[in-house]
Image (tube, rainbow, N blue to C red):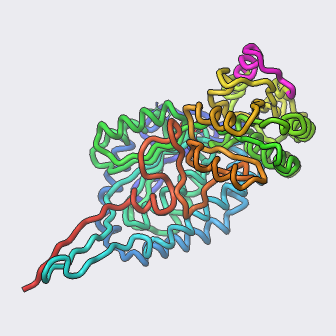
Amino acid sequence: MTTQLKNYIGGAWAAAETATYESVINPATCATLAQVPDSSAGDVDRAVAAARAGFAEWRSTPVLSRAQYMYRLKNLLEDRFEDLAQTIVEENGKTIDEARGEVRRGIESVDYATHVPSLMRGYKVEDISSGIDETAERQPLGVFAAITPFNFPLMVPLWFLPVAITCGNTYIIKPSPQTPISMNTLFELLDELDLPEGVVNLVHGGKDAANAIMEHPDVTGVSFVGSTPVAKIIYETCAKHGKRVQAQGGAKNYIAVMPDADINASVSNIIGSAFGCAGQRCLAGSVVVAVGDAYEPLKAELLKRSATLRLGYGLEETTQVGTVISAQARERIEKMIADGVAEGARAVLDGRDAKVEGYDAGTFVGPTILDGVQPEMHIAQEEVFGPVLSLMHVPDFDSAIDVINRSRYGNAASLFTQNGGHAREFKYRVQAGNIGINVGVAAATASFPFGGQKESFFGDLHGQGPDSIEFFTDRKVLIERWY
Ligand code: NAD
């Protein structure tokens, strides 16, 4: 019998009060790794009660002491670095190097939280009126929660929890039921910190647990990362229940390549962007827009190098492309490729029916390139979230920008060029939250805000960086006069 994962509530591990468990599957070996509970509203209620009860003591714990917990967490994460990376590979299917990158990015978010004592400073003006001083000070707000996706099971929760609690709030994580194990490992480390009870809580589950969080009157705010249809539900539901909300959604990221670009370097970046993490990144390059004469050499080089990528189990160091998350995801991705072909695209590299020796049941999709893609095709408009790259050809720079801005998504866009003028125009005109210039994955680092535009983001304050301090604190104004 595989392990039944527990929730972590009020400083102790607790079995969920549910009879419903789902299997967590290693997508390469198809081994069952654990059983994850579909926690009930009652489980969420207990976690919220613990978080609420823990708030008063935690909030009055000096901010410097709160930050000390983050230094210790960072050390524990460093000690368990390889272990965490291996867990990510096993439950998610990405390669071990990609998983190490994820752990590193997660640790950078913990690093950022150690700066909270200076980041949450307020401001003051003396003599705002005769003998009157005015101060704005930041205060934590109470119980916050995150509802997170399968594709970065460790890093995404760490965008939120460290800053939220170091600002003095208490926290609940509801991870993806597809990749819940990384969070159990993180909470083992949090348990070692001996934080006061209720500061951090873990509730496994799906839609029901998410709804219970969003509807709970004692939850102040919710951070969501996931697909756009769910992001819309989260944004609406949280607004209806009077909560702060930041909802990061799906993506369709375009990469434009100018004729003056360094083709070799561009192709390395594009391959990393499109096929890294088997295309299951919200920043994955999904459509390459080749401008004018860039098309032929770019296509030739892309094809040549993509065709040699080694598909395999992420724990084998030689693997360059891992699995997609599930058999259901593979079916959806393969159908999108077939629909693209039916719409008139040419599968010049076709990763459907990919097989890897020794992993017959693995949910592999090989790198796929669809040529002749037109802006009105479904494949050019919808998120694939798999290793599928569409190739378009446009006559000039302005047409590339038009095509990109027609997308209803706006998470990221990149330009490959050696022309500074085009680079500036691109940054200025393209409607996307993250712009890469000769960079294929424009991922904001922990001290910068991360979020998209249009249907890739619902809310105003992004995750990470100074926005996260704004999101997790309120500014209270004090006006004082002394006689
Ligand atoms: P998902 O939307 O299916 O699930 C995300 C979370 O929402 C999970 O915890 C899930 O249990 C919960 N959920 C699912 N349906 C729900 C519902 N009806 N009501 C309430 N909660 C619900 O996303 P996923 O498949 O886990 O992740 C992939 C998606 O995440 C992609 O679209 C990707 O682009 C996006 N993503 C975005 C970012 C970003 O920063 N914008 C980062 C990573 C992933």
- Seen as rendered, the residue at the extreme bottom is 483
Residue at point 78% right, 53% down?
418
Q: Nearer the viewer, residue 3 or 167?
A: 167
Vertical position of residue 126 compared to residue 456: above or below: below
Vertical position of residue 65 compared to residue 4: above or below: below
Q: Nearer the viewer, residue 433 or 198?
A: 433
- Looking at the image, residue 278 sits to the left or right of residue 264; the answer is left
Residue at point 54% right, 35% down?
227
Residue at point 81% right, 30% down?
369
User: On the rendering, which quadrant does ligand 1 occupy?
Assistant: top right
- The answer to whether residue 98 is visible is yes
Residue at point 75% right, 18% down?
338
Quadrant for the C terminus in the image = bottom left
Vertical position of residue 449 compared to residue 291: above or below: below
Vertical position of residue 151 compared to residue 128: above or below: above
Q: Position of residue 171 (x, y in %)?
A: 41, 56
Q: Position of residue 74 (x, y in %)?
A: 59, 69
Q: Name which quarter of the figure residue 364 lies in.
A: top right
Q: What's the magenta region?
A: 335-349
